[in-house]
Image (tube, rainbow, N blue to C red):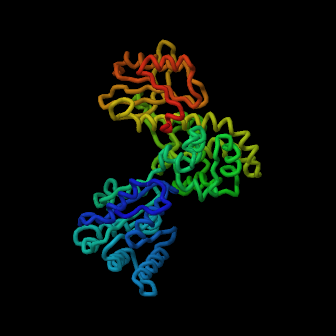
Amino acid sequence: MLTKPEGMFDRNAEWTSLVGFATSTAPSVRFGVVSGRRRQGKTFLLDAIARATGGFYFAASEDTELESLRRFGRALGARAGTGGEFQLGNWEEAIERLYAVVPDGLIVIDELPYLLAASPALASHLQRALDPGGVARERASKLLVCGSAMSIMGGLLSGNAPLRGRASLELVVRPMDYRTAAEFWGVAEEPELAVLLHSIVGGTPAYRHEFVHSDAPAKTADFDEWVVRTVLNPAVPLFREARYLLAEETGARDAALYHGVLGAIALGHNTRGGIAGYLERPSTNISHPLTVLEDSGLITKEADAFRTGRSVYRIAEPLITFYSAVMRRNWSFLERGMAEQAWQAGRDTFRSQVVGPHFEQLCREYALRSAVELFGEPPTEVAAGTVADPAERTQIQVDVVVLGTDGAALCLGEAKWQQTMGLPHLDRLRRARDLLAVKRVRTERVRLACFSGRGFTEELRRAAAADPTILLIDLPRLYGA
């Protein structure tokens, strides 16, 4: 086992997977794919595994095919120690030369989508190299390709794509989970601050140091000043990151429409009809941007746990939610360098429209990771759900729904970030449980869970102490204390 480099926080599973691929002696292990959204540390991982194994590493950039071949030829020349560069006429010739220069060991090509954009036939050339009779079959080398453009990387091995069925490794480098992110930022002992931070920067490791000059709040009381001097500061790279992410991931031509869609979702208009209504456009006009945003991994489409055919959209990158709900709406302040005024105008929106829904998502993640411990079995689905109440002519929104393998409801939960929860919240969950039982949803094993960022009343605590089917989850418990 190759030792994980010093300075690499967590990423144990990813490192183990890369080491297993790079050191495998199986002749069938010759091609792997690494993907993930930008800023997750993929390049750091791949450069580290290439260095640890003495492999060849090439990082592509946005170039023409001719310039990419020239850069590739120079990199191969440096590897071969010729003191010059190889003259390569096309990618078929380049691949032949690659395996001649690196006949064994690890080969890493980072940001493959840049090469594919200029040379779409490259995937077919790689397929021929990997197929029987191809040059890769004659060598002991292993090829890893990587990319951040999720729509392109997602299609690399799907359907009738040339490389489908060739990969021995398909590794997705995801953002750190909320508990790991809290440790990374040094706020694991301050769970309220951890939630606030995660609502902006999520679990993206690059935002901890490079993008904020290693500036991090130490206490919850420091949070507002930290936001003003970093996220809302035009001199700090994180200030423009959300806009860059949208441009890099989607290549959006109508940027205003895409920002409008994201802004609608960030403010709670998260159904297709709700988004269209907020933008005052026909729903057909937003189909394409929704598809592009979903394919690029910037938004997700989540089905309602109890209503077939109903789904909602959620923004996958917290920084984009923060930008859409807070920064974009107060841009007149920000473009004049008036960060404090912008934060004063947007702070209430942040607490209600950003942190509140984000806290609900963290609660669902907690329910998923703790399901066996809490409910005694793994879940088939953890989502939000809507329960119709005909008698009251209303709907009960259930923030955390856990369904078991037999379709039974294992948990019905309500999450409140800014409220001290009491018996009325429990009564609402009981009402939802009874309504579901009438609809023949199995509820005999269900537990009713209250998730709160402000704690619970004494009456609710007494009720939970007397009934083991009631769960009270506060911030320390959410973060494992």
- For image coordinates 71% across by 44% down, the residue present is 330
Above/below status of 457 relative to 148: above
Nearest to the observer: residue 225 or residue 435: 225
Image quadrant where one finds the N terminus = bottom left
Is residue 116 visible to us here?
no
Quadrant hosting residue 82: bottom left
Above/below status of 305 relative to 284: above
Is residue 381 visible to us here?
yes
Instruction: Give the total of numbered labels.
Output: 0
Nearest to the observer: residue 343 or residue 448: 448
Residue 345 in the image, given as x and y percentages of width and height:
72, 39
Residue 358 in the image, given as x and y percentages of width and height:
54, 38
Above/below status of 375 relative to 138: above
- For image coordinates 47% across by 79% down, the residue present is 70
Residue found at the very far bottom of the displayed protein: 83
- For image coordinates 37% across by 60% down, the residue present is 18
Q: In the image, is 444 to the left or to the right of 335?
A: left
Quadrant hosting residue 433: top left
Residue 207 in the image, given as x and y percentages of width and height:
57, 54
